Image (cartoon, helix red, strand yellow):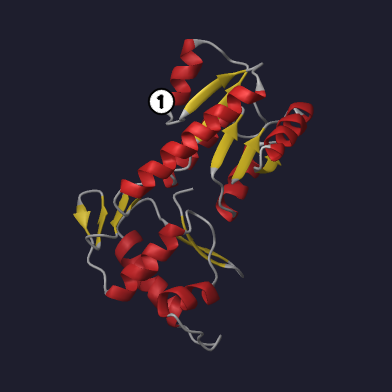
């Protein structure tokens, strides 16, 4: 299980990471909110631990940005701010739990394990529905909406959109798309992927203010509201 930790206190971050790694977690430490969001876009984690008072982008704002594109990964706020108003602000931004510093590492571990059990249970019963900004993708019914407007897609367009959504904001390469959507390796000179990305952009983004389908030059494509 992989944990992404946002904590600018280097001593606490090191001690906490060592404890969690001793409990069979893999921990990546990040010290500012901007780097944290970059890491979220590039890799998959099972849980996020966020301090609030960190450089560049606060933990609260990081939490809010994550929830625009990912409603499932558990988020625990770990903060020295213990007022009820601080906790309320965090939960209003859809954090799952809040732990006030100083805390015992064992208590944090229990909360992590509880949230992971809940997440695993929910994933066994939840429909295959992705929500990003005002975009909703229902894999079961094979329907796509932006807001209240239903968007008609071809089979391949739908499969491509689902693959981008399942990446949860991470960049996927042209090679990965052809292997998963077309289940074959194309000649690298073919423009089939680019053509279908353009088809999707015309249907998903063209008539909407917030653009969701993005190109990362030299790397590939990603679906994200950030």
- Relative horizontal placement of residue 38, taking residue 16 as reference (left or right): left
Task: Count residues near mark 1 (Cα–Cα under 10 Å), then give few for <14, some for 14-19, many for 20+.
Answer: few
Q: Is residue 146 visible?
A: yes
Secondary structure of the residue carrying tag 1 is: helix
Q: How many marks?
A: 1
Q: Is residue 71 visible?
A: no
The residue under label 1 is: 92
Q: Residue furthest front?
A: 23
Q: Residue at x 46, y 38 (%)?
A: 117
- Relative horizontal placement of residue 225, taking residue 25 as reference (left or right): left
Out of 96 and 208, give the one closest to the viewer.
96
Q: Residue furthest top?
A: 83
Residue 11 placement: quadrant: top right
Instruction: Indicate the position of residue 36 as horizontal and vertical percent values.
Output: 62, 42
Residue 57 placement: quadrant: top right
Q: Is residue 13 above or below residue 37?
A: above
Q: Residue furthest right?
A: 11
Q: Residue at x 49, y 77 (%)?
A: 179
Instruction: Indicate the position of residue 76 as horizontal and vertical percent values.
Output: 53, 30
Instruction: Indicate the position of residue 170 as horizontal and vertical percent values.
Output: 53, 57
Q: Residue at x 58, y 15 (%)?
A: 81
Q: Is residue 145 above or below residue 219?
A: above
- Relative horizontal placement of residue 107, taking residue 206 as reference (left or right): right
Q: Is residue 202 above or below residue 179?
A: above
Out of 22 and 212, give the one closest to the viewer.
22
Instruction: Indicate the position of residue 4 as horizontal and vertical percent values.
Output: 62, 41
Q: Residue at x 41, y 56 (%)?
A: 212
């Amino acid at each position: 299980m992989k944990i992404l930790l946002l904590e600018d206190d280097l001593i606490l971050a090191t001690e906490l990471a060592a404890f969690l790694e001793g409990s069979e977690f893999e921990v990546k430490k990040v010290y500012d909110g901007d780097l944290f969001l970059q890491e979220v876009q590039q890799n998959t984690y099972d849980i996020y631990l966020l301090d609030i008072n960190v450089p560049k982008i606060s933990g609260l704002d990081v939490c809010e940005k994550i929830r625009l594109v990912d409603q499932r990964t558990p988020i625990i706020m770990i903060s020295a701010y213990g007022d009820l108003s601080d906790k309320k602000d965090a939960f209003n931004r859809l954090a799952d739990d809040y732990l006030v510093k100083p805390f015992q590492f064992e208590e944090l571990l229990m909360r992590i394990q509880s949230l992971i059990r809940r997440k695993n249970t929910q994933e066994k019963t939840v429909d295959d529905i992705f929500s990003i900004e005002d975009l909703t993708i229902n894999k079961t019914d094979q329907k796509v909406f932006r807001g209240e407007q239903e968007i008609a897609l071809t089979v391949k367009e739908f499969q491509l959109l689902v693959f981008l959504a399942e990446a949860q904001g991470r960049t996927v390469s042209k090679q990965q798309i052809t292997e998963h959507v077309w289940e074959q390796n194309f000649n690298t000179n073919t423009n089939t992927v680019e053509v279908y990305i353009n088809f999707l952009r015309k249907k998903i983004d063209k008539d909407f203010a917030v653009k969701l389908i993005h190109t990362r030059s030299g790397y590939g494509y990603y679906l994200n509201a950030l």
